[in-house]
Image (tube, grey):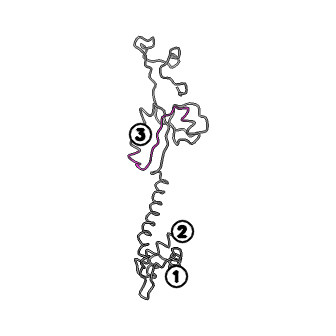
């Protein structure tokens, strides 16, 4: 059984106005069209909703029982339109983000806090991921946004700069490289590393 929202709206207006002509004038529709809608509504529900008299119309017991649910149904429809408008404007929804540990530990906490304060209806799903896997996740649409250390792209993805990071070398005080003010990356390759993952962009 499908109920027409327009018919429900006209039914509510007729009950409020007490006359079909007044309701029709208020809704800018012909009185005959209102009467037809009401008749179809009564046929759909299988019960009389209004008593028509020379002085106007009054709701039956069934009509009074329908009044509250009809108003609630129309409010729900209005809320749906409002929520969908929020999605269209980008102020409601879900965003999936995959990010490397560097951005997670330095930049994202403050940025996400500010974003959530501005758009509290947007749910953020955040996961840590190495750069190579992040690119694959974006390419396969497993996530919406990926933050990675720049490298070769597996597919044609839209890339925008987020933040600039600086690599620092940490070594024991007695290490041969410890006394230098600057160290080139290639100068470090002859020495063992701690914490370098095989699938890391670095």
In primary-sequence order, the first of circles 1 and 2 is 2
* Front position among marks 2 and 3: 2
The alpha-carbon separation of the residues under discs 2 and 3 comes to 47 Å
Whether pointer 1 and pointer 2 mark residues with C-beta atoms closer than 8 Å, the reply is no
Q: Which residues are magenta?
A: 116-134
Q: Position of residue 62 (x, y in %)?
A: 44, 76
Residue bearing mark 1: 32
Give the residue displayed 47% in from the left and 17% down from the top: 183
Q: Quadrant of residue 157?
A: top right
Q: Position of residue 175 (x, y in %)?
A: 43, 12
Queried whether the magenta region covers residue 103, the answer comes back as: no
Residue 23 position within the rendered picture, expressed as x and y whole percent measured from the top left:
44, 78
The residue labelled by disc 3 is 111
The local crowd at label 3, few if under 14, some if 14 to 19, many if 20 or more residues have their Cα within 10 Å, is few
In the displayed structure, 41 sits above or below 116; it is below
Q: Give the mark nearest the N terminus, 1 or 3.
A: 1
Q: Which residue carries the number 2 mark?
A: 2
- Say which residue appears at 41% left-offset and 87% top-offset: 55
């Amino acid at each position: 059984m499908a109920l027409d929202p327009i018919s429900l709206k006209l039914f509510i207006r007729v009950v409020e106005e007490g006359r079909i002509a007044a309701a029709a004038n208020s809704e800018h529709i012909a009185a005959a069209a209102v009467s037809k809608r009401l008749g179809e509504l009564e046929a759909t529900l299988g019960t009389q909703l209004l008593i028509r008299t020379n002085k106007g119309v009054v709701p039956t017991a069934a009509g009074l029982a329908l009044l509250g649910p009809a108003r609630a149904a129309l409010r729900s429809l209005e809320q749906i339109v409002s929520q969908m408008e929020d999605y269209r404007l980008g102020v409601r929804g879900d965003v999936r983000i995959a990010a490397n540990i560097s951005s997670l530990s330095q930049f994202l906490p403050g940025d996400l806090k500010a974003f959530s304060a501005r758009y509290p209806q947007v749910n953020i799903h955040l996961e840590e991921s190495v750069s190579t896997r992040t690119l694959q996740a974006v390419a396969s649409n497993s996530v919406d946004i990926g933050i990675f250390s720049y490298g070769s792209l597996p597919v044609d993805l839209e890339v925008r700069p987020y933040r600039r990071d600086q690599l620092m070398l940490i070594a024991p005080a007695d290490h041969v490289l410890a006394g230098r003010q600057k160290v080139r990356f290639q100068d470090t390759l002859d020495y063992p590393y701690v914490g370098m993952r095989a699938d890391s962009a670095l």
